[in-house]
């Protein structure tokens, strides 16, 4: 019984890794900051936007591959995030809202580095 609990606990940790921190592309054209209090700040092409974010396995259901949802301005963005070596891969899963808003350019596929967290 203890072994089953241990396996479930390990699986839960890896599937919901803490994403809080600041990430930027190389060269730095896009930046995401996920605050521990679930506030969000993003910058792309010299424009910035503030909002909130949430994380979880069903946050963007029915799009199960997404684990992060950002709400900012006139849009909502669902991203899948995974770590490969010392880089983070942000993959756009779905965007809803005004494609002319400040959030849309941030809801994109990108390879990023974590600069603080």
Image (cartoon, helix red, strand yellow):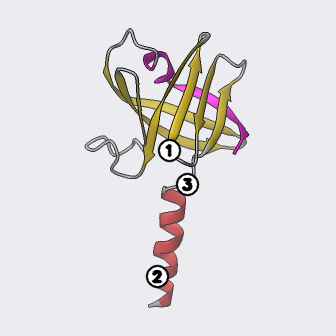
Quarter of the rendering occupied by the N terminus: bottom left
Q: Nearer the viewer, residue 63 or 106?
A: 106
Sort mark 2 into few (<14), some (14-19) or many (20+) by Cα contacts within 10 Å: few
Instruction: Specify the farthest residue to the left.
Output: 62
Residue 73 in the image: state x and y as whole percent: 40, 22
User: How far is mark 1 from mark 3, CA to CA?
Assistant: 15 Å
| Residue 107 in picture, x, y percent from top left | 46, 24
Tell us which disc is closer to us: 1 or 3: 1
Image x and y of residue 100, in percent: 38, 8
Location of the C terminus by quadrant is top right
Is 4 placed above or below 29 here? below
Element carrying mark 2: helix
Q: Which residue is mark 1?
A: 38
Mark 1 falls on what kind of element?
loop
| Helix, strand or loop at mark 3 | loop
Give above or below for 33 relative to 38: above
Instruction: Name the N-terminal-most of marks 1 and 3.
Output: 3
- Residue under numbered circle 2: 5
Q: Which residue is mark 3?
A: 17
- Front-most of 41 and 109? 41
Residue for point 50% across, 85% down? 3
Q: Nearer the viewer, mark 2 or mark 1?
A: 1
> Which badge, 2 or 3, is on the more N-terminal residue?
2
Q: CA distance from mark 2 to mark 3?
A: 18 Å
């Amino acid at each position: 019984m203890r072994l089953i609990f241990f396996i479930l606990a390990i699986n839960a940790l890896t599937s919901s890794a803490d994403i809080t921190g600041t990430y930027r592309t190389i060269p730095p054209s896009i930046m995401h900051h996920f605050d521990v209090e679930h506030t969000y700040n993003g910058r792309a092409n010299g424009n910035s936007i503030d909002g909130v974010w949430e994380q979880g396995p069903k946050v963007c259901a029915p799009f199960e591959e997404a684990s992060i949802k950002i709400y900012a301005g006139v849009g909502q963005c669902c991203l899948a995030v995974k770590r490969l070596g010392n880089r983070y891969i942000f993959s756009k899963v779905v965007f809803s809202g005004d494609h002319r808003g400040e959030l849309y350019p941030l809801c994109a596929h990108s390879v990023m580095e974590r600069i603080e967290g």
